[in-house]
């Protein structure tokens, strides 16, 4: 794992933010946002909006990449995001829901929670 990502994970784990979600945490950990702030539900549409524009600035990958983004979506919305911190087995750092602390979890444990409503799983990474 890159040092900058590890440092941002340590910062994220230290705090409980009452208005925080998985989107803001993932963007902060990846260095795509300077602050760990909630991305409002109105900005999670697939095809347009703030979150979509940020994702489209990344490069899509066919498989998990250490330090990359994982997202769960359907045709209309992005439902969940996290940062890949291990690729074998795939482990992600994410904030499981509003009003929760961020955590490390194996993808195999959490994917059932999100795939039911958001069956498209995609991987992205920073182009630089």
Image: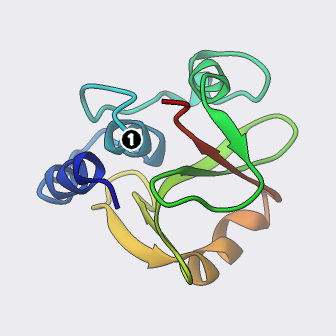
Q: Position of residue 77 (x, y in %)?
A: 74, 37
Q: Position of residue 20 (x, y in %)?
A: 33, 42
Q: Position of residue 96 (x, y in %)?
A: 45, 62
Tell me the colour scheme of the image.
Answer: rainbow
* x 52%, y 35%: residue: 126
* x 73%, y 16%: residue: 48
Q: Quadrant of residue 26?
A: top left
Q: Position of residue 124 (x, y in %)?
A: 63, 44
- Image height of 62 relative to 25, above or below: below
The extreme right residue here reads 75
**Total count of labels:** 1
Q: Which SS class for mark 1?
A: loop
* x 24%, y 29%: residue: 35
Whether residue 9 sits left or right of residue 15 in the image: it is right
* x 82%, y 34%: residue: 76
Q: Quadrant of residue 33?
A: top left
- Image height of 117 relative to 108, above or below: above
Q: Which residue is mark 1?
A: 30
**Where the N terminus falls, by quadrant?**
bottom left
């Amino acid at each position: 794992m890159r040092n900058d990502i590890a440092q941002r994970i340590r910062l994220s784990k230290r705090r409980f933010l009452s208005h925080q979600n998985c989107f803001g945490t993932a963007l902060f950990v990846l260095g795509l946002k300077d602050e760990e702030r909630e991305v409002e539900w109105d900005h999670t549409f697939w095809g347009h909006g703030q979150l979509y524009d940020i994702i489209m600035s990344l490069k899509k990958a066919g498989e998990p990449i250490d330090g990359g983004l994982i997202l769960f979506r359907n045709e209309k919305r992005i439902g969940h995001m996290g940062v890949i911190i291990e690729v074998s087995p795939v482990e992600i750092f994410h904030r499981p829901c509003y009003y929760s602390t961020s955590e490390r979890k194996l993808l195999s444990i959490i994917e059932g929670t999100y795939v039911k409503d958001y069956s498209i799983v995609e991987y992205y990474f920073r182009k630089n």
